Amino acid sequence: MTPEQLRLTLLAKFRTASEDRLAKLNADLMSLESDPDQSDVVERVMREIHTLKGESRMLALAPINQVAHRTEDLLVAARDLGFQIPRDHLRGIYRGLDLLAKLISTDLSALGPGHAEVGAAFDTAVKAFQAGDTVRWKDIDVAEASQATAETGAADTSEAHASKGDAEAQSKRRKEPARKGDQFISVSSRSVTELSDQASQFSLRQAQTKSLANDLVRLMRDSVRAGEVMQAGLTDLAEETGMADAVRSSLNTCKKLGALHKEMVDRVQRLSTEVFESELVSGSLQESVRAMRLLRITTLFNKYPSAIRDLADEQDKAIRILIEDNGVAIDKQVLEALEEPMLHLIRNSVDHGMEEPSERERAGKPEVGIIRLAARKSGESIEVRIEDDGRGIDPQRIRQTIVRRGLLDDESAAKLDCDELYQFLFASGFTTRKAVSDLSGRGVGLDVVRKTLESLGGSVRVVSEVGKGTTFHLRVPVSMALSDVLLVQLAEGLAAIPAENVVEVLKLDRSAVRRSEGGAFVELSNAGLTPFADLGNILGLQQLTRVDGDLLALHLRYQNQDVCLAIRSVRGQRRLVQLKRSPFISRATYTTGSALIEGGEVVLFLSVPTLFQRATRSGTALSEVPTVESSDAEPALKVLVVEDSELTRQMLTTTIANMGFTTLEATDGLDALQKLEKIVPDIILTDLDMPGLNGFGLLEKIRGDDRLCTIPSIVLSTRDSQEDKQRAVEAGANAYLVKGAFRESKLKRTFEYVLEGR
């Protein structure tokens, strides 16, 4: 992997990790608004923003680092006040998180000057706030056009001085950002749907081609056997009758035909192999398309808090946003269709549903109102709730409006129950308000909500209580009963493994399997050293792999862990309806259910957590697995990397591995001590700020252990004060490096220095 490829990989991981961190930060801040006395939440908030700041600094993402740094300053001040802070202080923190989210969503490989201006503007605003000045936080934002403007301007300037011969190269350079940031390419939902349909058709055609190829192989083999029988019969006839010349001619013809048949068998077998390879491509294509279509609903929910806060500020309302996504993933097309209806409902909640602070106080409510966005799975559907604790919807006002508009008479309107009344809210132009604001009114846009949901095959329902609040229940269909799976052949029968857990199907040379005290492992290009097992063995069945030849294996991933399982063969990717566990398979703990396919063949759905437990039952963590060297090679020195940031840990382990060392990993001080009970590394490289046992405590524990005290220890931290350096040295560090000034060459020289002093 080249340095540029490594950086792009790390940037992609940084984006994913940071989006997760920001989601946690927003959720934790909302929690602290309602209950500031949560020390564990406060500690988590400080750790997340500190890690985000450190990772952005390590990757030289200056604008993100600057905003994260100042957001951390605001959080430190809030922590010191026990999170009993003015709303303007809280707005500043949320604005920092909003800016970070927008910066992280840009092309990280080419942050432009406009983004630097955002960092500087937020830096200035925080300093002004700390000085006691009034700050309009919402005026600081990321200009969407700043990046494009900067790049276009640079391209125009360079083109003005370029010769005609340079035009093609200029064009190629302008296209490079799109190639590197391909995840930002805009693709319509319709295009994705068409691609999905085509992938399904391709898979079906592939299955048919495979069936034809198998039939050809069978027919050709039967033909060869028939020719061999005929040849043997002619030979016997020639010996018995003495009709040598006539029989010999027929025998020669038969031999030629047999040779031709064998050559045809060879060609058909090669065709069968090609079909198999094509089938793997088909499976990969379907998995890619499926991944394109599924998105966490959090990606939609996270678009609204900033808008809600800005709308609330405009109306002098105090609103807290709560998000409960429950890990729900939803089809991209459905997600996009929900965006506008949800925005209508949220704006209605802010404008019409939520009272002003004085009105809430008179009603005996807390000054700060709550809007909750929640999602959960419900059977074959997903239910989205938009809930507020505002003034609620008055059924009597709806009746009056119905009568006033001549839709029903008084008697008919009086007979309607609440559910029937609420349905009128979704009629075009229906509103109980006499004057509708520029923002919204109950009814404005609600007809769009209903029509959109109905076009998706979904529905919307309203539950409300006067003085208590309103909840909109949006229900959208998701094929929860349908499972995309990869079918694999067991010793007897078929098994299904969820396609979302299948990273790839690959062929391995048997020499690639390495063994150590922890078990068997293989080195995978996209996962590193990975536990290896035979699927048949871990299920307690007959071993599935062949005695000789290459191994066919599945690379599976579950909860950020990987295993590689040897299998007999792959039957292709399918979408199956999973049936409930029957009494006949209830004792098979490795199954979650079954399905039926053509011909009445039963397919067992395998439990992925069980597969991982059995494949790694030795208890050896992935980070502890030693590299197996050949007997005549000098074993590589081991470096234990203690770092709570997964992204920073990966960058360090990759860098250290490139130096020729073996790397072991620990997520914090306590994890490191557990690792050190089993192994003794040659060097320990540790961060200082970690949950559980921090770096200072780890150093002190090591120096107090006679078995470990001679191991050289190096600190790599974002802390750069002389006091921290001195404290680390006193705790037992042999060297101290600052993350902001991290260089591979400097780390290598430090390793050489501490090893010489052993």
Image (cartoon, grey):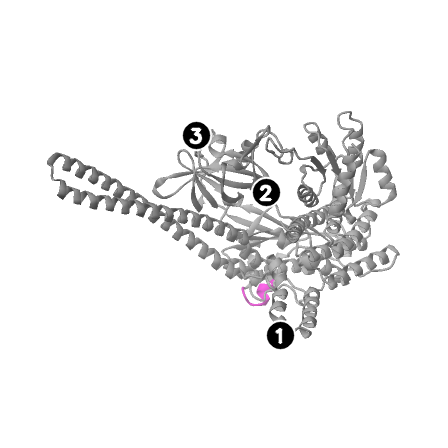
Residue 406 horizontal/vertical position (percent): 55, 67
Locate residue 284, reporting x and y percent: 49, 49
Q: Is residue 609 left or right of residue 690?
A: left
Instruction: Tell me where residue 216 appears, x and y as whole percent.
Output: 31, 47
Observer-nearest residue: 210 or 391? Answer: 210
Residue 401 magenta: yes
Crowd band around label 2 with a 10 angstrom C-alpha radius: few (<14), some (14–19), many (20+) = some
Of mark 2 and mark 1, the one earlier in the sequence is 1
Element assignment for label 1: helix
Q: Tell me which residue sits at (75%, 48%) in the image.
A: 743
Dividing the picture into quadrants, the one containing residue 214 is: top left
Q: Nearer the viewer, residue 674 or 26?
A: 674
Tell me how far mark 1 sits from mark 3, CA to CA: 68 Å
Disc ID at residue 527: 2
Work out how far the residue at label 2 is from the one at label 1, CA to CA, in angstroms: 46 Å
Image quarter where the C terminus lies is top right
Q: Given the image, on which type of amino acid does mark 2 rest?
A: Ala
Residue linked to disc 3:
542
Q: Give me the C-alpha separation between circle 2 and circle 3.
A: 28 Å
| Displayed quadrant of residue 738 | top right
Name which quarter of the figure residue 109 lies in.
bottom right
Foreground mark, 2 or 1? Answer: 1
529 relative to 197 in the view: left or right: right
Crowd tier of the residue under label 3, counting other residues whose Cα lies within 10 Å: few below 14, some 14–19, many 20 or above: some
- Write down the region rendered in magenta: 400-408
Q: 528 above or below 619?
A: below
Residue type at mark 1? Lys
The residue at which mark 1 appears reads as 164
Amino acid type for the residue under numbered disc 3? Gln
Residue at 42% from the left image edge and 55% from the top image edge? 201
